[in-house]
């Protein structure tokens, strides 16, 4: 292999230096960067219609605050849930495995004009089991609803953060 000549090495170094300075001048901002006050208290929240919507709404309020009447946007969350059996286990301690599905929509409107500026629908799920004890079954269903709603809130939170960072 031949050694690189001095003028060629200088040209390569100059090109690399120019590239470094060019890239250093870029101001890329991560989509999920928390910009503090830029996203806090910019949304007021409508009352939820059911328990799962309340769980999602509470998570979003913790993340984004509640701007009250001064907020430039109003948001609402609507959810619906359904459970379906996945499998049945026979034996001395029979159990059935279910999946709790939650569908939710986050709607954000301009507080002045009422125009919808974001409408985002997403789904989430959680699994649970049932057995011969009805009280334990009710607790398992409620737990699955809460876990699915928390997952839904995470997804909607990411989408709302992107919207608020860009608006």
Image (cartoon, grey):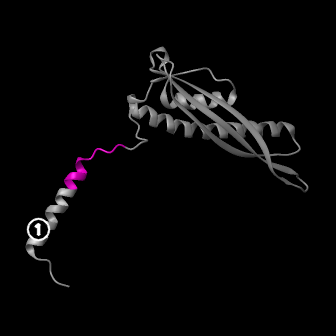
Q: Residue furthest top?
A: 69
Which residue matches tag 1? 10
Image coords of residue 146 (percent x, y): 67, 36
Residue 128 left/right relative to 17: right
Camera-nearest residue between 159 and 148: 159
In the picture, the quarter occupied by the C terminus is top left
**Nearest the eye: 102 or 120:** 120
Tell me which segment is drawn in magenta. Answer: 20-29
In the picture shown, does residue 144 fall above or below 111? below
Q: Nearer the viewer, residue 121 or 67?
A: 121
Name the residue: 85% across, 50% down: 95
Instruction: Determine the image quadrant of residue 77.
Output: top right
Mark 1, Cα crowd under 10 Å, few <14 / some 14-19 / many 20+, is few
Q: Horizontal and vertical percent for residue 127? A: 72, 47
Compared with 10, 108 (above or below) is above
Asked if the stretch drawn in magenta spans residue 76, the answer is: no
Image quarter where the N terminus lies is bottom left
Residue at the image point whose x is 41% and y is 34% from the top: 165
Total of numbered circles in the picture? 1
Say left or right for 134 vs 128. right
Q: Is residue 25 magenta?
A: yes
**Element carrying mark 1:** helix
Q: Where is residue 162, by image quadrant?
A: top left
Above/below status of 78 relative to 144: above
Q: Residue at x 59, y 28 (%)?
A: 57
**Residue 16 placed where, x, y %?**
19, 62
User: Where, by quadrant of the figure, is residue 40 drawn?
Assistant: top left
Secondary structure character of the magenta stretch overall: helix
Q: Residue furthest right?
A: 92
Residue at x-position 73% and y-position 42%: 100
* Left or right side of 124 for 85: right
Please determine whether, in this image, residue 48 is positioned above or below residue 120: above
């Amino acid at each position: 292999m031949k050694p690189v000549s001095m003028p060629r090495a200088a040209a390569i170094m100059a090109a690399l230096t120019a590239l470094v300075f060019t890239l250093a001048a870029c101001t890329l901002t991560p989509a999920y960067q928390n910009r503090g006050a830029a996203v806090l208290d910019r949304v007021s929240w409508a009352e939820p219609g059911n328990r799962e919507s309340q769980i999602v709404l509470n998570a979003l309020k913790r993340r984004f605050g509640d701007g009250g009447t001064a907020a430039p946007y109003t948001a609402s969350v609507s959810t619906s849930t359904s459970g379906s059996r996945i499998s049945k286990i026979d034996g001395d301690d029979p159990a059935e495995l279910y999946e709790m599905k939650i569908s939710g929509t986050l709607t954000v409107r301009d507080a002045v004009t009422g125009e919808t500026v974001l409408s985002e629908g997403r789904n989430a799920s959680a699994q649970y089991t049932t057995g011969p004890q009805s009280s334990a079954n009710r607790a398992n269903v409620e737990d699955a609803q809460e876990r699915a709603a928390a997952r839904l809130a995470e997804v909607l939170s990411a989408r709302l953060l992107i919207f608020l960072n860009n608006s």
